[in-house]
Amino acid sequence: MKQEGRGGVSERILLKGGRVVDPAAGRDEIADVLIEDGVIVSADASRSGASVVDADGLVVAPGLVDLHTHLREPGREDKETVETGCRAAALGGFTAVSPMANTEPVADTAAVIHEVRDLGARAGLCDVFPVGAITRGLGGEEMAELGEMVEAGVRMFSDDGRCLPNARILRNALTYAKAFDGIVIAEHCEDGPLAEGGQMHEGYHSYSLGLAGQPREAEEIVVARDLAVVRLTGGRLHLCHLSSAGSIEIVRRAKAEGLRVTAEVTPHHVVFSDEDLGTYDTNFKVNPPLRTPEDRDALRLALADGTIDAVATDHAPHAVEDKEAEFDQSPPGTIGLETALAAVLTHLVEPGLLPLARAIEAMSTVPARILGAAEHGGPIEPGRPANLVAFDPGAAWVVEPPFASKSRNSAFLGTTLRGRVIHTLYRGDLVVADGKAQR
Amino acid sequence: MNKHLLSIHDVSAEDVVRVLDTAESFREVGTRVIKKVPALRGRTVVNLFYENSTRTRISFELAAKRLSADVINFTTSGSSVSKGESLKDTALTLQAMGADAIVIRHSSSGSPLTLTKWVKGSVLNAGDGTHEHPTQALLDLYTMRERLGRLEELRVAIIGDVLHSRVARSLSFALVKMGAEVTLVGPPTLIPPDAPAWGVQVSYDIESVLPKLDVCYMLRVQRERQRQQYFPSVREYARLFGLTRTRVSMLPDDALIMHPGPMNRGVEIDSDVADLPNSVIEDQVTNGIAVRMALLYLLLGGTRTDDGEAA
């Protein structure tokens, strides 16, 4: 979906003097980036007439790509709309997001997919790649019309929030999806009966706080089951928001075996743990739950060594009144688009746990590849669409409202993060300039 | 003392002694013809009960009234809550009405702590979900100390559905804090696997534990747990973990039998066991009023004037 240069006038932007970190090209150097009509052109080309954007001291990287976003529209526009979510994304440095299918109505038909895409195009703040439901109404029984949704542009299918209830449905979905090129089935791994009622990770803290626990095995059982089905079908599977050290070991073995699997982790799972639940703060209630510090450390290592491929936000906006409720009555989820990059920079890159280039790869290059979003994730080379982010890695800020998101249920609320998005270019358009959304 | 009583972790061992000593002085008030002191005259205590609990509510109500406080009972059925009012709005309303203390009972763990974010007065946890029931633990400690003269090195078994019991949590934490030796007993499905980290022992064999006890504390076992498959049948539960006449004979002669109520006679405790002389279940109820008086008095910083010089 190409956007026309506005007014037919040739527009030139020169991103000057930034540190270009471009994992797709294996590049990390101080360089200028010249953009003409939304496309990167050779920096040697005539720069006359270009508006200069000073990127001195900033990191210039391919725009971030989120594999796991909840935009709530249609159905819960009080929590988020495609437009407000896209604005939050742009402010967080994202140039593409993948809204999950658990809307009302569920995104299980081409009609709903078209609606969400159109809302995204109208907002014009980033690309919106809707995720289609695997089963009708997320019911876990009948397969949705995947082919029709593929024609509508869907690349990823998921019943996120619900785990496929049995191996047979997954087998059929993985096998059927082979009819279409580059399609990925994404799974939220959670054994229903074992996890039922669970409010947090099951362990010392859940027992002491009197909150029903959800054991890590509820995730691991399904990860193991699903990978067996991948072996059976030769299908292509993506694992959403892994939370447990045990899951990582299973994925590691599957990858060594050559199974076609990728995995993501959220910023909150690599930053927080079940030790943070002591005040019953519902912003730490997420699904899968925050697990132990040992799990968190294993997730960090797995992200660094590539066993976990990508960082995804699982941006999950909820109304204030829903989150200001009793812990067991509050819905799980934290917003994340506006804090993801800074959280990764502050808690992983700065302490030396993750090289900067790997962080950008995991937040841009790899998710773009998983999603088949060819115009995202770099390389930053002539002829490529200018989907870019420029951020100040050292700028400290306190996470607090107002957010661009309609909701404010952030697990990071009140914490100080370092790393601030200064400019976001979406197809050459400065949708965020000097840290402010331009529309 | 902290401003609120949300968990046993909010009170130090010193505080516990202070509460029990204060309760002892209030105990006498309940034996007078005029069962009242003016310590909290003009103060407002709200009983905010999201869960039915006649005995705890009445105990708190009597405690507050014997201290001359104004008492408002707010139960959720037939109130604004049944019209969908949130905990926050209810809290703000009570705050606006000038509640000095809010006694809250709620089925959701952590609700009392959440409530403290919205009210200026003291919050007393009268039982939250499967978390804690600190006033019950303190009245149990009072009863043990009164009957046995000490808490240190008392050997106490807490028997039954520990997993879902707020009483078991608060009582375990409190007894460990006071230097008692606690053993949790029950089917493995109903004992938290991480319980040893609380500083307690765990046993699945009631009969091996009974001969060494000073206190045998039975927990209520809900029949619902059988439906959830925590144990195969109520009959088998009673057979393996119930306190029968035969098992009582395995206890040392002076050991106490306690139960927080309400009892399931014939399930966790045989009917005639509950009525034995070393069963102090009714004492627990009586002492509950004095302990709650002490807590309201200490948390609200009540001053003693004219005839109320019990402290």
Image: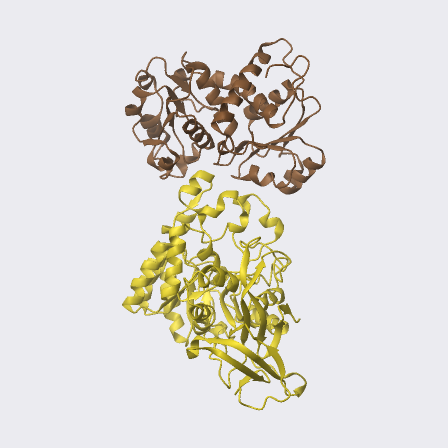
Chain colours: A yellow, B brown
Q: Residue at x 64, y 20 (%)?
A: B65
Give A16 or A170, whichever is nearer the viewer: A16
Question: Tag count in the figure?
Answer: 0
Give x and y (percent) for residue A389.
54, 73
Residue A244 against residue A357 in the figure, above or below: above
Residue B219 against residue A392 in the figure, above or below: above
**Res B211 quadrant in image:** top left
Give x and y (percent) for residue B197.
37, 37
In the image, is B279 to the left or to the right of B6? left
Give the quarter of the figure containing the C terminus of chain B: top right
- Residue B59 visible from this viewpoint: no
Give x and y (percent) for residue B290.
56, 18
Q: Residue at x 49, y 52 (%)?
A: A286
**Res B45 quadrant in image:** top right
Farthest residue, direction bottom: A46
Q: Residue at x 51, y 50 (%)?
A: A284
Give A13 or A351, whichever is nearer the viewer: A351
Farthest residue, direction top: B33
Give A356 or B207, whichever is nearer the viewer: A356
Give the quarter of the figure containing the N terminus of chain B: top right
**Res A403 quadrant in image:** bottom right
In the image, is A190 to the left or to the right of B119? left
In the image, is A229 to the left or to the right of B15? left
